Image: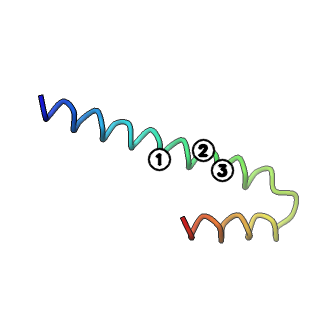
Amino acid sequence: MTHVRISLARARARRAHLRQERALQRAFAGAPTVESAHEIAVLTTRR
């Protein structure tokens, strides 16, 4: 049973990470200027 819980937790964490990555890609794509994209990139390194 523990193995199942660990597997589910890993899958949840993986999905959350991918969701964050997609959100960042949308933010980069929607950045009006190169400076804005750079600011977004800097914020991502602080998380």
Query: Does residue 41 lie above or below 29 as drawn?
Result: below
Q: Position of residue 15 (x, y in %)?
A: 44, 38
Q: Locate residue 5, reporting x and y percent.
A: 21, 33
Please say if the residues under marks 2 and 3 sit with CB atoms less than 8 Å apart: yes
Q: Position of residue 21 (x, y in %)?
A: 56, 49
Q: Secondary structure at mark 3?
A: helix
In the depicted structure, whether residue 29 falls above or below residue 36 = above
- Image quadrant where one finds the N terminus: top left
Residue 42 image-quadrant placement? bottom right
Binning the other alpha carbons within 10 Å of mark 2 as few (below 14), some (14 to 19) or many (20 upward) gives few
Per the image, the residue denoted by label 1 is 17
In the displayed structure image, the side of residue 34 where residue 22 appears, left or right:
left
Q: Which residue is mark 2?
A: 22
Residue 9's tag is none
Q: Which residue is mark 3?
A: 25
Residue displayed at 56% across by 47% down: 20
Which residue is at a point 50% across and 44% down the rendered structure image?
18
Amino acid type at circle 2 is Arg
Residue sitting at 71 percent across and 64 percent down? 40
